[in-house]
Amino acid sequence: MLETRTDIAPSHRDAFLVIDSSLLVQAMSWRAETVLGVTEDSAVNRPVMQLLVPADAEAGRPARFAAALVEAAAGADEPVNAFVRPWNTFGVRLRARVASCGPPRAALVVLEQQAARPLRVVS
């Protein structure tokens, strides 16, 4: 059983992952298995970047997700939001809420799918 802040704690229906300080996946929910298209057995002890990659490269902040994971696994107090996508899928954008959890100390990543935004045509 892991503990985290009540404002970040996932429900049994949420997609979430637990990432250790080496940025390896240590656990994932059944919903995360569905969203990412992998089983927990095949994901555990794999680098998280083999499953999720930053989706905000255009914004100039691609390292935000990795930094948030490292800080959360070290025990950072405040949750961080970042945007990610499954490593092999384009056109999907997930909001990742990253916070510290434990023991043992790790990063909790709760995923929320973002609605597609319509394209704005500029002439």
Image: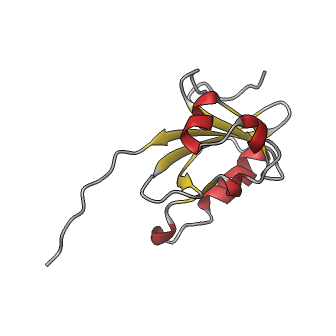
In the rendered view, tell whether residue 57 sits above or below residue 71: below
> Which residue reaches farthest bottom?
123
Q: Position of residue 88 (x, y in %)?
A: 57, 58
Q: Nearer the viewer, residue 101 or 27?
A: 27
Q: What kind of colouring is applied to the model shown?
A: secondary structure
**Residue at 46% in and 71% down:** 58
Q: Position of residue 95 (x, y in %)?
A: 49, 46
**Residue at 79% in and 31% down:** 102
**Residue at 57% in and 36% down:** 34
Q: Nearer the viewer, residue 60 or 15?
A: 15
Q: Is residue 37 left or right of residue 71?
A: left
> Which residue reaches farthest left?
123
Residue 62: in sight, yes or no? yes
Q: Nearer the viewer, residue 113 or 97?
A: 113
Q: Position of residue 11 (x, y in %)?
A: 56, 22
Q: Is residue 99 left or right of residue 83?
A: right
The quadrant of the picture occupied by the N terminus is: top right
In the rendered view, tell whether residue 87 sits above or below residue 41: below
**Residue at 24% in and 56% down:** 118
The quadrant of the picture occupied by the C terminus is: bottom left
Residue 78: in sight, yes or no? no
Q: Is residue 52 left or right of residue 93?
A: right
Q: Position of residue 90 (x, y in %)?
A: 47, 60
Q: Is residue 27 left or right of residue 91?
A: right
Question: What is the number of callouts on the image?
Answer: 0
